[in-house]
Amino acid sequence: MSDDSKLIYRIKDLEVSERPRERLQHLGAQSLTKAELLAILLRVGVAGENAVQLGQRLLDTFGGISGLHRAPFEEMCQQHGLGTAKTAQIKAAIELGRRLTLESPDEKHTIHNPEDVVSLVSFEMSTMEQEELWVISLDTRNRVINIQQTYRGSLNSSHMRIGELFRHAIRVNAASIIVVHNHPSGDPNPSPDDVAVTKAILQSGKLLDIEMLDHIIIGMGKFVSLKERGLGFS
């Protein structure tokens, strides 16, 4: 084994033009790849891998940023090149990114299409291990007033209290709502219960004069708009 194989490969071992920190400073964070952003957190690699290569290995192993977010802490710690401190740094950075998507103190998100909804909630919902239903309350210009977790557990129209879904929307004087829930299996195709729940919510909304604009199911990297498929909205 050569001496080179025993070296710790650091960011400063890279050419200056290839160093993630310098590139971030001069070009902005948006110019960096996911592996390069991870490299800034990792700081050093391991024998045979610089920090960028280590970051890419982690992305490949866990299936991207969402996989790192979902991975158990101890499982990440067992990866070659990681430990408690580095795993904590990665988890903290991802959590900050997640919270940023939910914060908008100076501006409101405007919903134009299902993709706008998905970009707002999919980062968190696609990693959940249990099914949850969220209600997005909107004003008359389709701007998000807030997002409320309303129900946890498999959707079943005979067990759900549909009126509870509208409680917060009524309180904030919402003009309309969008219902979103996740499928932990990763497959966003709607079940018969999903369609039945959609019909029940739609009818209740008409009675309360709060329009239900869509029901969106989030899977792993995929989604389904029941409104676009005409399921429950006839």
Image: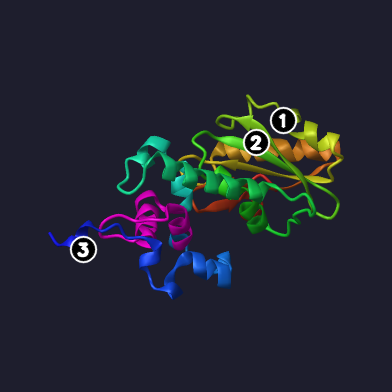
Instruction: Kindly identify which residue carries mark 1.
Output: 162
Could you tell me if the residues under marks 2 and 3 are in contact, i.e. CB atoms within 8 Å?
no
Q: How many marks?
A: 3
Task: Give whichever of discs 3 and 1 has the lower sequence position.
Answer: 3
Dot 2: few (<14), some (14–19), or many (≥20) neighbours within 10 Å? Answer: many
26, 223: nearer the viewer: 26
| Residue at the extreme bottom of the image, as rendered | 17
As drawn, 2 above or below 95: below
**Which quadrant of the structure image shows residue 156?**
top right
Q: Which residues are the magenta region? A: 36-64
Could you tell me if the residues under marks 2 and 1 are in contact, i.e. CB atoms within 8 Å?
yes
Helix, strand or loop for disc 3: helix
Task: Identify the residue at horizontal 74%, vertical 28% (top origin).
Answer: 164
User: What amino acid does circle 3 point to?
Assistant: Asp
User: What amino acid does circle 1 point to?
Assistant: Ile
As drawn, 220 above or below 197: below
Residue 132, image x, y percentages: 59, 35
C-alpha separation, residue under disc 2 versus residue under disc 3: 62 Å
Instruction: Kindly identify which residue carries mark 3.
Output: 4
Taking the image as shown, residue 199 lies to the left or right of residue 70, namely right
Task: Identify the residue at horizontal 52%, vertical 53% (top origin).
Answer: 222
Dot 1: few (<14), some (14–19), or many (≥20) neighbours within 10 Å? Answer: some
- The answer, for residue 144, to whether it is visible in the render is yes
Instruction: Kindly identify which residue carries mark 2.
Output: 197
